[in-house]
Amino acid sequence: MSAPNLDMMFQALADPSRRAMVERLSRGPASVSQLAEPLAMSLPAVVQHLQVLEASGLVATQKIGRVRSCSLHAPAMCIAEQWINDRRTEWQRRLDRLGDYLDATNDDLEPETNR
Amino acid sequence: MTDTALTQRTTVKATFTVERTYAASPARVFNAFADEQAKAKWFAGPPGFEQHEKKWDFRVDGVEVLGGRHASGVVTFFYGTYHDIVPNERIVYAYRMTFNGVPMSSSLTTIEIRPEGQGSHLTLTEYGVYFDGHADGGAAREHGTNWLMDQLGASLAD
Protein backbone atom coordinates (compact mmCIF):
# COMPACT_ATOMS: atom_id res chain seq x y z
CA MET A 1 0.00 0.00 0.00
CA SER A 2 1.34 3.44 -0.93
CA ALA A 3 2.16 5.95 1.76
CA PRO A 4 -0.07 9.02 1.83
CA ASN A 5 1.19 11.42 -0.81
CA LEU A 6 -0.87 14.50 -1.53
CA ASP A 7 0.94 15.39 -4.75
CA MET A 8 0.23 11.97 -6.21
CA MET A 9 -3.35 12.10 -5.00
CA PHE A 10 -4.05 15.46 -6.58
CA GLN A 11 -2.32 14.33 -9.76
CA ALA A 12 -4.50 11.23 -9.78
CA LEU A 13 -7.59 13.35 -9.23
CA ALA A 14 -6.71 15.82 -11.97
CA ASP A 15 -8.39 13.54 -14.52
CA PRO A 16 -12.20 13.69 -14.81
CA SER A 17 -12.58 9.94 -15.45
CA ARG A 18 -10.54 9.10 -12.38
CA ARG A 19 -12.59 11.61 -10.37
CA ALA A 20 -15.76 9.91 -11.54
CA MET A 21 -14.32 6.58 -10.38
CA VAL A 22 -13.42 8.02 -6.96
CA GLU A 23 -16.88 9.54 -6.62
CA ARG A 24 -18.42 6.17 -7.46
CA LEU A 25 -16.19 4.46 -4.86
CA SER A 26 -17.05 7.03 -2.20
CA ARG A 27 -20.52 5.40 -2.22
CA GLY A 28 -19.00 1.94 -1.63
CA PRO A 29 -16.71 -0.72 -3.14
CA ALA A 30 -17.22 -1.75 -6.77
CA SER A 31 -15.82 -4.21 -9.28
CA VAL A 32 -13.76 -3.01 -12.24
CA SER A 33 -16.64 -3.60 -14.65
CA GLN A 34 -19.06 -1.72 -12.38
CA LEU A 35 -16.59 1.18 -12.41
CA ALA A 36 -16.32 1.03 -16.20
CA GLU A 37 -20.08 0.92 -16.75
CA PRO A 38 -20.91 4.66 -16.64
CA LEU A 39 -17.67 5.63 -18.41
CA ALA A 40 -17.34 5.67 -22.18
CA MET A 41 -14.06 3.75 -22.24
CA SER A 42 -12.64 0.28 -22.67
CA LEU A 43 -11.95 -2.01 -19.74
CA PRO A 44 -8.14 -1.82 -20.27
CA ALA A 45 -8.37 2.00 -20.13
CA VAL A 46 -10.28 1.76 -16.85
CA VAL A 47 -7.64 -0.60 -15.49
CA GLN A 48 -4.93 1.91 -16.42
CA HIS A 49 -6.73 4.71 -14.57
CA LEU A 50 -7.20 2.36 -11.66
CA GLN A 51 -3.46 1.77 -11.53
CA VAL A 52 -2.82 5.51 -11.20
CA LEU A 53 -5.39 5.74 -8.41
CA GLU A 54 -3.88 2.74 -6.67
CA ALA A 55 -0.33 4.16 -6.90
CA SER A 56 -1.53 7.40 -5.30
CA GLY A 57 -2.86 5.44 -2.34
CA LEU A 58 -6.42 6.67 -2.94
CA VAL A 59 -7.85 3.37 -4.06
CA ALA A 60 -7.14 -0.17 -2.93
CA THR A 61 -7.99 -3.20 -5.04
CA GLN A 62 -8.32 -6.81 -4.06
CA LYS A 63 -8.95 -9.87 -6.18
CA ILE A 64 -11.87 -11.88 -4.83
CA GLY A 65 -12.29 -15.00 -6.96
CA ARG A 66 -12.41 -13.81 -10.57
CA VAL A 67 -13.55 -10.31 -9.66
CA ARG A 68 -11.26 -7.41 -8.76
CA SER A 69 -12.93 -5.33 -6.06
CA CYS A 70 -11.98 -1.68 -5.67
CA SER A 71 -12.48 0.48 -2.61
CA LEU A 72 -11.71 4.01 -1.63
CA HIS A 73 -8.95 4.64 0.78
CA ALA A 74 -8.73 8.04 2.50
CA PRO A 75 -5.26 8.03 4.02
CA ALA A 76 -4.46 8.76 7.62
CA MET A 77 -2.87 12.10 6.74
CA CYS A 78 -6.09 13.35 5.20
CA ILE A 79 -8.09 12.11 8.15
CA ALA A 80 -5.78 14.03 10.48
CA GLU A 81 -6.19 17.15 8.34
CA GLN A 82 -9.93 16.71 8.58
CA TRP A 83 -9.63 16.28 12.34
CA ILE A 84 -7.76 19.59 12.58
CA ASN A 85 -10.39 21.33 10.45
CA ASP A 86 -13.06 19.86 12.69
CA ARG A 87 -11.33 21.25 15.80
CA ARG A 88 -11.14 24.70 14.21
CA THR A 89 -14.78 24.58 13.14
CA GLU A 90 -15.80 23.41 16.61
CA TRP A 91 -14.02 26.38 18.20
CA GLN A 92 -15.61 28.80 15.72
CA ARG A 93 -19.00 27.40 16.65
CA ARG A 94 -18.27 27.51 20.37
CA LEU A 95 -16.92 31.05 20.35
CA ASP A 96 -20.02 32.19 18.45
CA ARG A 97 -22.12 30.55 21.17
CA LEU A 98 -20.00 32.37 23.76
CA GLY A 99 -20.92 35.63 21.98
CA ASP A 100 -24.62 34.72 22.18
CA TYR A 101 -24.20 33.87 25.86
CA LEU A 102 -22.42 37.17 26.57
CA ASP A 103 -25.16 39.11 24.77
CA ALA A 104 -27.89 37.25 26.63
CA THR A 105 -26.30 37.91 30.03
CA ASN A 106 -25.54 41.54 29.31
CA ASP A 107 -27.58 42.79 32.30
CA ASP A 108 -25.76 40.95 35.04
CA LEU A 109 -22.12 40.84 35.87
CA GLU A 110 -21.13 44.15 34.29
CA PRO A 111 -20.50 46.33 37.34
CA GLU A 112 -18.46 48.93 35.46
CA THR A 113 -21.39 49.82 33.19
CA ASN A 114 -23.91 50.04 36.05
CA ARG A 115 -24.85 53.54 37.09
CA MET B 1 -10.42 -3.11 10.05
CA THR B 2 -7.39 -4.82 8.52
CA ASP B 3 -6.37 -1.93 6.31
CA THR B 4 -2.59 -1.75 6.38
CA ALA B 5 -2.26 1.92 5.47
CA LEU B 6 -4.72 2.87 8.17
CA THR B 7 -2.53 1.31 10.85
CA GLN B 8 0.53 3.28 9.69
CA ARG B 9 2.02 5.46 12.40
CA THR B 10 1.76 9.09 11.41
CA THR B 11 1.83 12.39 13.28
CA VAL B 12 0.49 15.59 11.83
CA LYS B 13 1.52 18.77 13.63
CA ALA B 14 -0.65 21.78 13.10
CA THR B 15 -1.70 25.09 14.55
CA PHE B 16 -4.77 27.22 14.08
CA THR B 17 -6.10 30.50 15.46
CA VAL B 18 -9.68 31.66 15.91
CA GLU B 19 -10.42 35.31 16.79
CA ARG B 20 -13.60 36.98 17.97
CA THR B 21 -14.64 40.43 19.17
CA TYR B 22 -17.32 40.56 21.86
CA ALA B 23 -19.46 43.39 23.22
CA ALA B 24 -18.52 42.41 26.77
CA SER B 25 -15.76 43.37 29.18
CA PRO B 26 -12.66 41.15 29.48
CA ALA B 27 -13.89 40.27 32.97
CA ARG B 28 -17.13 38.83 31.60
CA VAL B 29 -15.36 36.94 28.82
CA PHE B 30 -12.86 35.51 31.30
CA ASN B 31 -15.69 34.54 33.65
CA ALA B 32 -17.31 32.53 30.84
CA PHE B 33 -14.22 30.27 30.90
CA ALA B 34 -13.52 30.41 34.64
CA ASP B 35 -16.99 29.71 36.05
CA GLU B 36 -18.28 26.14 35.68
CA GLN B 37 -21.96 27.11 35.30
CA ALA B 38 -21.16 29.93 32.88
CA LYS B 39 -18.93 27.71 30.74
CA ALA B 40 -21.54 24.95 30.62
CA LYS B 41 -23.96 27.47 29.04
CA TRP B 42 -21.94 27.75 25.83
CA PHE B 43 -19.24 25.03 25.90
CA ALA B 44 -21.63 22.12 25.43
CA GLY B 45 -20.91 19.00 23.44
CA PRO B 46 -22.45 18.80 19.96
CA PRO B 47 -26.18 17.98 19.60
CA GLY B 48 -26.92 14.47 20.83
CA PHE B 49 -23.82 14.36 23.05
CA GLU B 50 -24.42 12.15 26.09
CA GLN B 51 -22.07 13.13 28.93
CA HIS B 52 -20.39 10.24 30.78
CA GLU B 53 -17.80 12.02 32.90
CA LYS B 54 -17.01 15.57 33.93
CA LYS B 55 -14.31 17.03 36.15
CA TRP B 56 -13.81 20.70 36.79
CA ASP B 57 -10.84 22.33 38.57
CA PHE B 58 -10.09 25.78 37.19
CA ARG B 59 -6.65 26.56 38.64
CA VAL B 60 -3.05 26.06 37.54
CA ASP B 61 -2.40 22.28 37.59
CA GLY B 62 -6.15 21.70 37.87
CA VAL B 63 -7.54 18.89 35.71
CA GLU B 64 -10.61 19.15 33.51
CA VAL B 65 -12.26 16.08 32.02
CA LEU B 66 -15.19 15.89 29.63
CA GLY B 67 -16.15 12.53 28.19
CA GLY B 68 -19.18 11.08 26.54
CA ARG B 69 -20.88 9.47 23.58
CA HIS B 70 -21.66 11.38 20.40
CA ALA B 71 -24.79 10.88 18.31
CA SER B 72 -22.62 8.88 15.88
CA GLY B 73 -21.80 6.39 18.67
CA VAL B 74 -18.18 7.53 18.98
CA VAL B 75 -16.99 8.01 22.56
CA THR B 76 -14.57 10.92 23.03
CA PHE B 77 -12.72 12.06 26.15
CA PHE B 78 -11.01 15.38 26.77
CA TYR B 79 -8.34 15.42 29.49
CA GLY B 80 -6.94 18.91 30.14
CA THR B 81 -4.57 20.55 32.63
CA TYR B 82 -4.37 24.31 33.16
CA HIS B 83 -0.85 25.67 32.79
CA ASP B 84 -1.32 29.41 33.20
CA ILE B 85 -4.21 31.58 34.34
CA VAL B 86 -4.05 35.37 34.42
CA PRO B 87 -7.49 36.68 35.45
CA ASN B 88 -9.24 38.60 32.67
CA GLU B 89 -6.24 38.22 30.35
CA ARG B 90 -4.98 34.73 29.63
CA ILE B 91 -5.73 31.01 29.99
CA VAL B 92 -3.31 28.31 28.83
CA TYR B 93 -4.06 24.60 29.02
CA ALA B 94 -2.76 21.38 27.53
CA TYR B 95 -5.14 18.58 26.66
CA ARG B 96 -5.31 15.20 25.03
CA MET B 97 -8.25 13.57 23.32
CA THR B 98 -9.20 9.95 22.86
CA PHE B 99 -11.60 8.40 20.35
CA ASN B 100 -13.13 5.16 21.61
CA GLY B 101 -10.24 4.98 24.08
CA VAL B 102 -7.54 5.38 21.41
CA PRO B 103 -5.21 8.42 21.74
CA MET B 104 -6.10 10.88 18.99
CA SER B 105 -4.25 14.13 19.75
CA SER B 106 -2.24 16.22 22.20
CA SER B 107 -2.69 19.98 22.08
CA LEU B 108 -1.74 23.24 23.75
CA THR B 109 -4.42 25.93 23.80
CA THR B 110 -3.78 29.62 24.53
CA ILE B 111 -6.70 31.97 25.06
CA GLU B 112 -5.87 35.68 25.18
CA ILE B 113 -8.38 38.39 26.04
CA ARG B 114 -7.72 42.10 25.64
CA PRO B 115 -9.94 45.15 25.87
CA GLU B 116 -11.08 46.54 22.54
CA GLY B 117 -13.20 49.67 22.53
CA GLN B 118 -16.17 48.99 24.81
CA GLY B 119 -15.70 45.25 24.46
CA SER B 120 -13.06 42.53 24.20
CA HIS B 121 -10.99 40.79 21.61
CA LEU B 122 -10.38 37.06 22.09
CA THR B 123 -7.63 35.10 20.35
CA LEU B 124 -7.57 31.33 20.67
CA THR B 125 -4.53 29.48 19.36
CA GLU B 126 -4.06 25.72 19.33
CA TYR B 127 -0.89 23.79 18.65
CA GLY B 128 -1.54 20.11 18.17
CA VAL B 129 -0.04 16.77 17.34
CA TYR B 130 -2.55 14.42 15.74
CA PHE B 131 -1.83 10.72 15.86
CA ASP B 132 -2.32 8.16 13.09
CA GLY B 133 -5.66 9.58 12.08
CA HIS B 134 -7.61 6.35 12.19
CA ALA B 135 -9.04 6.29 15.69
CA ASP B 136 -12.70 6.57 14.79
CA GLY B 137 -12.54 4.14 11.90
CA GLY B 138 -15.25 4.46 9.32
CA ALA B 139 -16.50 7.91 10.27
CA ALA B 140 -13.02 9.42 10.01
CA ARG B 141 -12.49 7.69 6.71
CA GLU B 142 -15.67 9.20 5.36
CA HIS B 143 -14.66 12.63 6.66
CA GLY B 144 -11.22 12.18 5.15
CA THR B 145 -12.84 11.48 1.82
CA ASN B 146 -15.06 14.54 2.06
CA TRP B 147 -12.05 16.62 2.99
CA LEU B 148 -10.19 15.34 -0.03
CA MET B 149 -13.10 16.22 -2.29
CA ASP B 150 -13.26 19.73 -0.80
CA GLN B 151 -9.52 20.20 -1.30
CA LEU B 152 -9.92 19.02 -4.82
CA GLY B 153 -12.78 21.42 -5.42
CA ALA B 154 -10.68 24.27 -4.07
CA SER B 155 -7.67 23.35 -6.18
CA LEU B 156 -9.82 23.19 -9.32
CA ALA B 157 -11.32 26.61 -8.65
CA ASP B 158 -7.98 28.32 -9.48
Image: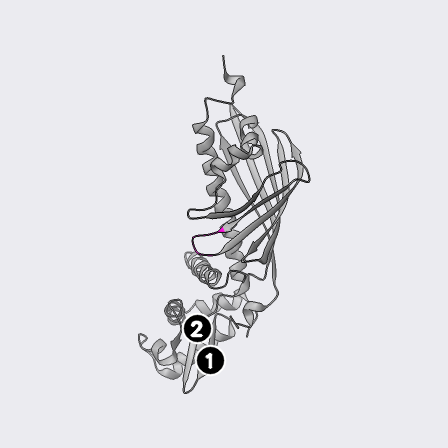
Which chain is home to disc 2? A
Look at mark 1 in the image and give the residue it sits on: A62
Look at mark 2 in the image and give the residue it sits on: A71
Tell me where residue A39 appears, x and y as whole percent. 32, 75
B11 versus B37 height, above or below = below
Q: Are marks 1 and 2 on the same chain?
A: yes
Tell me where residue A37 appears, x and y as whole percent. 31, 77
B44 versus B149 height, above or below = above
Which residue reaches farthest bottom?
A66
Quarter occupied by residue B111 = top right
Which chain is home to disc 1? A
Point out the image quarter for the N terminus of chain A.
bottom right
Helix, strand or loop under label 2: strand
Taken as a whole, is the magenta stretch helix, strand or loop?
Answer: loop
Read off the magenta span. B69-73
Quarter occupied by residue B105 = bottom right
> Is residue B42 inside the magenta stretch?
no
Decide: few, some or many residues near mark 2? Use Cα within 10 Å; few <14, some 14-19, many ≥20: many
Q: Are marks 1 and 2 in contact (CB under 8 Å)?
A: yes
What residue do we see at 53% from left, 53% from top? B76
What is the spatial separation of the Cα atoms under label 1 and label 2, in whole angstroms? 9 Å
Residue type of the residue flagged with mark 2:
Ser
Question: What label does residue A31 carry, if any?
Answer: none
Tell me where residue B135 appears, x and y as whole percent. 54, 61
Lower sequence index among marks 1 and 2: 1
> Is residue B72 inside the magenta stretch?
yes
Residue type of the residue flagged with mark 1:
Gln
Helix, strand or loop under label 1: strand
What residue do we see at 46% from left, 60% from top? B139
Decide: few, some or many residues near mark 1? Use Cα within 10 Å; few <14, some 14-19, many ≥20: few
